[in-house]
Image (tube, grey):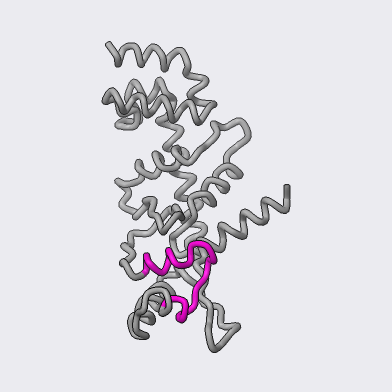
């Protein structure tokens, strides 16, 4: 009976669900509470009622396009807020609005592609990973260290964690090879290592703020 009532409710508020992202999230969570997964099949009845099947398929394709296009710069890591901004700019005028929860759901539908698409966290930073690579604990600690400044030096890592030189070089060199960090040799004595996903997000936010 609850499922029948939910279907009636969704049918009645179909337009609001498509156009109001906050309302869409609430309805989807309500579906989950009573055991209905609107994304279990693109062709499912509830998926068609909600209008989310094609929506998340289209969003997933746009996420892949953006991640692939920026991978050579950020090593396959992008700040979730940065991805959201790029999606909003990319989507056609009149398209359904997008919120963070929509990105999470679209990414969850990309798992069968086995491309490594998932959301990872470093401290308070939420990042979208788009490469099939597991980051080890040392690299995760260094990423967390740089979450506010977007950069670090070898000395920063030594002071923060007390690691020896070999351990620091092993960690940072691997991050350089994968493209997660770029090295700025302006200060030859203490070169700085920039986490490009953090830096790109900061630069984009400043650019948008200046434009406003």
Please provide percent x and percent y for residue 206.
Answer: 66, 56
- Name the quadrant of the N terminus: top left
Q: Among all residues in the image, which is located at the extreme bottom?
A: 189
Please provide percent x and percent y for residue 84.
Answer: 53, 46
Magenta span covers which residues?
Answer: 139-157
Give the side of residue 195 with respect to residue 9, left or right.
right
The residue lying at 33 percent from left, 59 percent from top is: 132
In the figure, 160 relative to 164: above or below? above
Please provide percent x and percent y for residue 156.
Answer: 47, 77
Please provide percent x and percent y for residue 115.
Answer: 35, 54
In the figure, 64 relative to 188: above or below? above
Task: Name the foreground residue: 92 vs 82.
Answer: 82
Q: Quadrant of residue 90?
A: top right
Task: Name the foreground residue: 76 vs 195.
Answer: 195
In the figure, 181 relative to 109: above or below? below
- Number of callouts: 0
Q: Quadrant of residue 25?
A: top left
Task: Name the foreground residue: 37 vs 137.
Answer: 137
The residue lying at 33 percent from left, 80 percent from top is: 167
The residue lying at 30 percent from left, 16 percent from top is: 3
The residue lying at 34 percent from left, 11 percent from top is: 5
- Quick check: is 190 in the magenta stretch? no
- Quick check: is 142 in the magenta stretch? yes
Task: Name the foreground residue: 101 vs 46.
Answer: 101
């Amino acid at each position: 009976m609850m499922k029948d009532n939910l279907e009636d409710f969704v049918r009645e508020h179909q337009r609001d669900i498509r156009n109001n992202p906050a309302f869409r999230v609430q309805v989807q969570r309500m579906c989950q509470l009573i055991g209905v997964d609107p994304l279990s099949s693109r062709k499912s009845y509830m998926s068609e009622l909600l209008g989310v099947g094609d929506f998340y398929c289209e969003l997933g394709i746009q996420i892949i396009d953006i991640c692939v296009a920026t991978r050579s710069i950020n090593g396959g890591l992008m700040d979730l807020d940065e991805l959201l901004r790029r999606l909003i700019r990319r989507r056609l005028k009149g398209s359904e609005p997008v919120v963070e929860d929509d990105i999470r759901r679209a990414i969850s539908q990309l798992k069968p592609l086995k491309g490594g698409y998932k959301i990872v966290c470093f401290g308070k930073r939420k990042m979208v990973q788009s490469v099939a690579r597991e980051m080890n604990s040392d690299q995760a600690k260094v990423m967390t260290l740089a979450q506010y400044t977007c950069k670090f030096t070898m000395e920063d890592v030594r002071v923060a964690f007390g690691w020896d030189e070999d351990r620091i070089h092993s960690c940072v060199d691997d991050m350089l090879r994968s493209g997660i960090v770029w090295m700025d040799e302006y200060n030859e004595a203490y070169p700085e290592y920039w986490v490009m996903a953090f830096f790109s997000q900061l630069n984009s936010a400043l650019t948008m703020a200046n434009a406003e």
